[in-house]
Image (cartoon, rainbow, N blue to C red):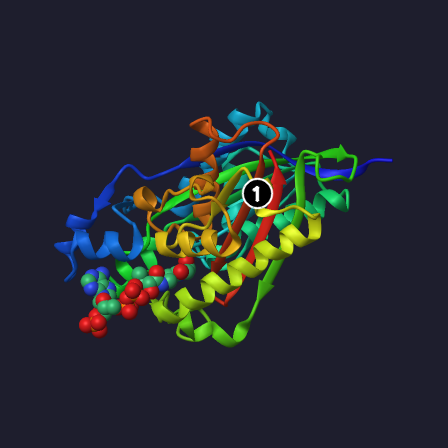
Amino acid sequence: MTIPRSLVIGCGSYLPARTVTNDDMSRIVDTTDDWIVERTGIRERHIAADDEFTSDLAVKAAEAAIAHAGIDAQEIDLIILATTTPDLTFPATATAVQARLGLRHGAAFDIQAVCSGFVYALTIADTFIKARQARTILVIGAETFSRLLDWTDRGTCVLFGDGAGAVIVRAGEGEGTIHDRGILTCHLHSDGRYQDKLHVDGGPSRTGTVGHVRMEGRDVFRHAVTNIAGAIKEALAATGLSADDIDWFIPHQANRRILDGTAKKIGLAPEKVVFTVDRHGNTSAASVPLALDVAVKDGRVRRGDLLLLEAMGGGFTWGSVLLRW
Ligand code: UT7
């Protein structure tokens, strides 16, 4: 007897052309390249052009993922787009992507879990596949996070960047063992008691404005290592696998020290960690699929490899996805 499995059959990404280095940042706020590199590992980030929107980034990443998967866009029957920076308050940016891809069938919606957005979206996609409600799902993480930054707050504006990543998830069958290709287990969490630690101080209902990112960095850091390590342990416990079985750890790229701390806490060899935070900064929901695309396209990730994805963000929200490529 076989069971439904969600196979990730292709990926793609897009970064805006403009890069902003730490030295560039030091001309905007009172900071230095040394401080940013030492505290975060970030060296540069990409920033969208004024006339470039989240949907533009998302469409480019989606087209790359469709080409990599070798499918016809018309085969897509569901689009799930994770973003904190939609083009407009409504309609969902996913519907703009649907229209731009020339799709008239199926459904498209956005999900909001800030930096955990892609892990949430992938988990939702897996659930649709297992319920046999969709066969070919485009899952995107896309952000123009620079639009939410207070460019006078050096504690936050140096951390974030813009970008998009996408994957194609296809319904398949497996034996129900850890040797199957596809998504093996997903674990999502949130704890709304910590909303104030990392939030945007505006919104349509409360202020009628877009608002800016506010963060108590040290507290977020502390919770991040604990929560992420917890979600990873759950994934390993659910499958009976150990940290040694993981071929590639593809985490949300918030801060190099968080990734080092998490890898150490779960006993994962540092060379198995995919780092892109140095070149991308923290791109929120886009960071995991961007890092995945880098590691797939540079040949590190190979068919059959076991990948551990995780993220943590505002809410707090956090989670993990374990999948065999
Ligand atoms: O993706 C969502 C999840 N987000 C995260 O995971 C972010 C988690 N937090 C962090 O990554 C770190 O807390 C930060 C990188 C944001 C900050 O690093 P930190 O080591 O926690 O520094 P801090 O906030 O405790 O600040 C230390 C000092 C302060 O100065 P004083 O009060 O000691 O004089 C800050 O004012 O560093 C100062 N500072 C800066 N200095 C130069 C803060 N930002 C900057 C800056 N350049 N950009």
Q: Is residue 6 above or below residue 158?
A: above
Q: Position of residue 71 (x, y in %)?
A: 60, 25
Q: Is residue 259 above or below residue 270?
A: below
Task: Kindly state the secondary structure of the residue where label 1 is placed.
Answer: helix
Residue type (three-letter) at the residue carrying disc 1 = Asp
Q: How many marks?
A: 1
Q: Residue at x 52, y 26 (%)?
A: 68
The residue wearing badge 1 is 244
Q: Is residue 58 visible?
A: no
Q: Position of residue 32 (x, y in %)?
A: 16, 56
Locate the N terminus and report the quarter of the image it occupies. Answer: top right
Q: Is mark 1 within 8 Å of ligand 1?
A: no
Judged from this view, the residue extending furthest toward the right is 1
Locate the C terminus and report the quarter of the image it occupies. Answer: top right
Q: Position of residue 15 (x, y in %)?
A: 35, 38
Q: Residue at x 52, y 76 (%)?
A: 193
